[in-house]
Amino acid sequence: MMSGQSVTIPDDRAFASFKAECLCEEGWSLSYSKGGITVWTQGLEEGKAVHKMKCRMVCKDVPGETMYDVLHDIEYRRKWDSNVIETFDIGKLTVNADVGYYSWKCPKPLRNRDVITLRSWLPIGKDYIIMNYSVKHAKYPPKKDMVRAVSLQTGYMIQSTGPSHCTLTYMAQVDPRGSLPKWVVNKSSHFLAPRAMKKINKACLKYSEWKQRHNPGLKPWLYPEQTTLPNIPLSELSIQHAESLENIDESSLAETHEREDSD
């Protein structure tokens, strides 16, 4: 995915290997399975920097192409994703790759995280892949009040399984920067990931009605000529190495029990 120091745009091989990893069961341990949602984790020992998680959801009443639209539509994300603090596109690299910013709320009392990623996407027959990894951009340095997380490789694979059925696999390989307490890791796989999946599913069911009222024809991820983003030369980007970022130790923080947003 990342060749040495230079930022590269994923090629077909990178998409194929992401897909293979999404489908692979070996080396993953099952940590949650309920109501059509399954979560696997890898290497989540305490003190280990990188967390790998894979989450799969079987969706009825959601066509694969609707799921693809929802995961791309940044305007809509601001509406349904209650974890989002701020998200925006910075610029485009090619017809199927761009750079964007995303910040999100972490469970209290952890500090919130943000990330700058190079995102690329590819429809493969009736399946779709959207994946990203962290990059650095001089105009968007880490902020004082947030922890800059590092996505080593994160993404979604959507498999169309029928005219209005699909399976969504979300896979994240992230360095959250900082030693996270065990409860966060457990909460992520048993509660936060499944809840996020359900939210996506719910968002898909309401999308077509929402989209009819918000630029119904505008889908630059399908029609690249519609994009208004400035072109960014690859030379403006560099790989975001985790070591260069502040490392914070939140491992001793206890969970604060606040009322969770009701879904």
Image (cartoon, rainbow, N blue to C red):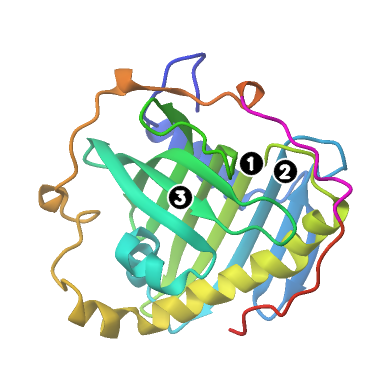
| Residue highlighted by disc 3 | 102
Q: Position of residue 195 (x, y in %)?
A: 63, 73
| Residue highlighted by disc 1 | 174
Q: Position of residue 46 (x, y in %)?
A: 88, 42
Determine the CA span between mark 2 and mark 3. 19 Å
At x 52%, y 38%, the residue is 143
Q: Amino acid at mark 2?
A: His
Determine the CA span between mark 1 and mark 3. 14 Å
Is 77 displayed left or right of 189 in the figure? left
Q: Nearer the viewer, residue 163 or 55?
A: 55
Give the tally of numbered discs. 3
Please state the extent of the stretch shown in magenta in the rendering: 245-253
User: Looking at the image, is mark 2 or mark 3 earlier in the sequence?
Assistant: 2
Overall secondary structure of the magenta stretch?
Answer: loop
Query: What is the residue that sits farthest to the front in this orientation?
Result: 144
Q: Residues within 10 Å of mark 2 (few under 14, many from 20)?
A: some
Q: Nearer the viewer, residue 112 or 70?
A: 112
Label 3 element class:
strand
| Residue highlighted by disc 2 | 51
Label 1 element class:
strand
Disc number lying in front (1 or 3): 3
At x 75%, y 52%, the residue is 41
Q: Are marks 1 and 2 in contact (CB under 8 Å)?
A: yes
